[in-house]
Image: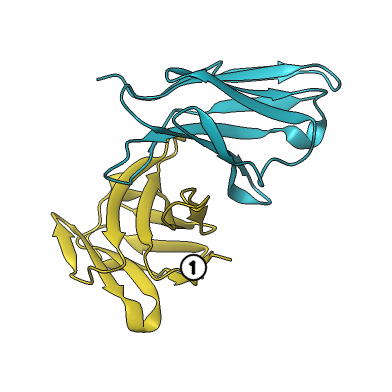
Chain colours: A yellow, B cyan
Amino acid sequence: AQKVTQAQTEISVVEKEDVTLDCVYETRDTTYYLFWYKQPPSGELVFLIRRNSFDEQNEISGRYSWNFQKSTSSFNFTITASQVVDSAVYFCALSGTGGGADGLTFGKGTHLIIQP
Amino acid sequence: DAGVIQSPRHEVTEMGQEVTLRCKPISGHDYLFWYRQTMMRGLELLIYFNNNVPIDDSGMPEDRFSAKMPNASFSTLKIQPSEPRDSAVYFCASRPRRPREQFFGPGTRLTVL
């Protein structure tokens, strides 16, 4: 069975601070995919990034960066110089490959509050 | 390109009534997924289709729930009869064969009184 754990239920920081959202996953699959989604107060789910299990290269996109470490089964998300518009619930998710494993297993989400 | 389209956006019904949620995936996407979001259980997969064929329906709560995908551009999720515990936001998502990220519709907020 697959499992995603986001231990931080809520994080509150002041604007311009850096913040890291933790994600730990469990899977028996050798090939799998990890994702981050953002859910702003309006309620939609916005795709942020996908990472394949065979590619541990970290990624940076503007103020966002992701650190994937298979050794610790973690896929953490860092926002640099946070802004009020970053306030949202962030979900980490995991999927397998075929055989009925294409659905996403989500963590419980981290509610990020950026205070002005 | 239009994103995933869901209707209705909001539905309020009374216990025992039949509810039908609708989804139009992004054109060209082979996979369609139905998820449910509640405060207690978070986001959970209900069922998904590949090329209109149901692949995994193990997340469907019980026989009151059914889903169909009669063609590549339309899917329905039906609850009959509805119960108050079915109140949730129901999301539809779709993705192509590659890459594997799913794109979500705006959701249907269902309230069963």
Q: Nearer the viewer, residue A102 or A93?
A: A102
Q: Is residue B111 above or below residue A43?
A: above
Quarter that holds the N terminus of chain A: bottom right
How crowded is the residue under tag 1: few (<14 C-alpha within 10 Å), some, or many (20+)?
some
- Estimate the x, y position of residue A80 in percent, counting from the top left: 20, 63
Which residue is rendered at x = 66% and y = 47% of the image?
B58
- Estimate the x, y position of residue A101 in percent, counting from the top left: 50, 53
Which residue is rendered at x = 28% and y = 71% of the image?
A68
Q: Please, what is the three-letter code of the amino acid marked with disc 1?
A: Gln
Label 1 marks a residue whose chain is A
- Estimate the x, y position of residue B56 in percent, counting from the top left: 59, 44
Q: Quadrant of residue B25?
A: top left
Is B104 left or right of B78, judged from the image as shown? left
Q: Is residue A58 above or below residue A86?
A: below
Q: Nearer the viewer, residue A55 or A113?
A: A55
Judged from this view, the residue extending furthest toward the bottom is A71
Q: Is residue A3 visible?
A: yes
Which residue is rendered at x = 49% and y = 72% of the image?
A28
Is A112 left or right of B99, judged from the image as shown? right
Q: Nearer the viewer, residue A50 or A111?
A: A50
Q: Which residue is mark 1?
A: A8
Q: Secondary structure at mark 1?
A: loop
Is B56 left or right of B60, judged from the image as shown? left
- Estimate the x, y position of residue A86 in percent, counting from the top left: 31, 49
